[in-house]
Amino acid sequence: MFAGLHDRGQTVFDTKTAATIMDVPRERAAVLLHDAAKRGLVTPIRRGLYNLVPFELGSETFHLASRYQLVHESMAGARYYLSHGSAMDIHQLATQPSFDVYVTSLTRRHEMNLGGTNVHYVYSSADRFFGMQKIDLGGQWVQVSDVERTLIDGLTLPAYCGGMVEVAKAFVMARNQLDIPRLTDYGRRMKKWAIMRRLGFILELFELASHQQLDEIRAALPTGYVKLDPDLPSEGGSSGKWGLKLNVSAEELISAVSH
């Protein structure tokens, strides 16, 4: 089995894969893997999922691959992308450490613990499942939202990115690589006016878009107000221009970004 996994370049595997490589029934494979875990040859991640302990670790009997690799393997071929705070981390747009992993998926899934890491799943409908790319993380290809989709997801669910202040910091950190037309296109495709209101406000506040681009965003907005941060109480000032309750003030955002 170990040689077969090595030939595949696979260090995270499930019982079905082990059974196929060893050409034994899954029940027998489960027994053999249980024994291998007791001998320190594999590390159980969750029921039916294992991490091979590399030979080069010598007498070590515990090993876990990167949390993103564990998530990739646990998805077992299902469509997904690493998103929100995890994508900010991968794109080096995060200023605060995140110990959880966020995954957007086409199927509804319960929160899971993988090797000690809490994994949060965000459901997406098929028409909103776009804006991702493949990235090589230490020899493992994973799906992650591109920079623009990462920021749009941050405006949608800032709590999964550390809050609106962290999202604003990410916008500024990404300043030199932002594709504004793509960003606004992604926002429109989400079909949520709240996202476009927040997007216009942030782009204007930090001078990330041209006047024409801002006017185009604003012209399409209906009347009404939403909260800048959907998870905080509706208090503070407001922006009539963008239809926002500023429960995180412009001054607070500017101060946070400048430090």
Image (cartoon, helix red, strand yellow):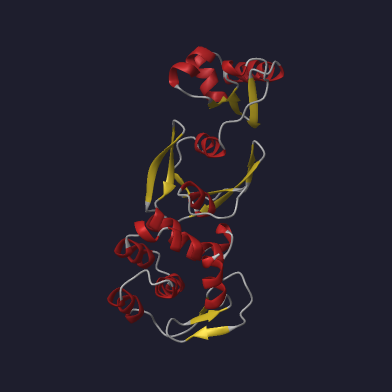
Would residue 219 appear left or right of 70 to someone viewing this image?
left
> Residue at (42%, 85%) from the top-left corner?
241
- Residue farthest along the front direction in this orientation: 259
Residue 1 percent coordinates (x, y) = 53, 14
Tell me the residue at 47%/84% (across/down): 224
Whether residue 151 is visible here, answered yes or no, is: yes
Placement of the C terminus among the 4 image quadrants: bottom right
Residue 163 in percent (x, y) is at 58, 64
Residue farthest to the right, as pictured: 38
Residue 239 left/right relative to 130: right
124 relative to 47 in the view: left or right? left
Residue 202, compared with residue 70, is above or below; it is below
Residue 164 in view here: no
Above or below, comparing residue 250 to residue 88 in the picture: below
Q: What residue occupies the far left of the structure in this picture? A: 212
Residue 109, placed above or below residue 176: above
Front in this rendered view, residue 172 or 83: 172
Image coordinates for residue 205, horizontal then vertical, percent: 44, 75
All told, the count of numbered labels is 0
Image x and y of residue 242, in percent:
43, 81
Which residue: 61% across, 19% down?
A: 57
Residue closer to the observer: 20 or 49:
49
The quarter of the picture where residue 45 lies is: top right
Question: Is the residue 31 above or below the residue 166 in the image?
Answer: above
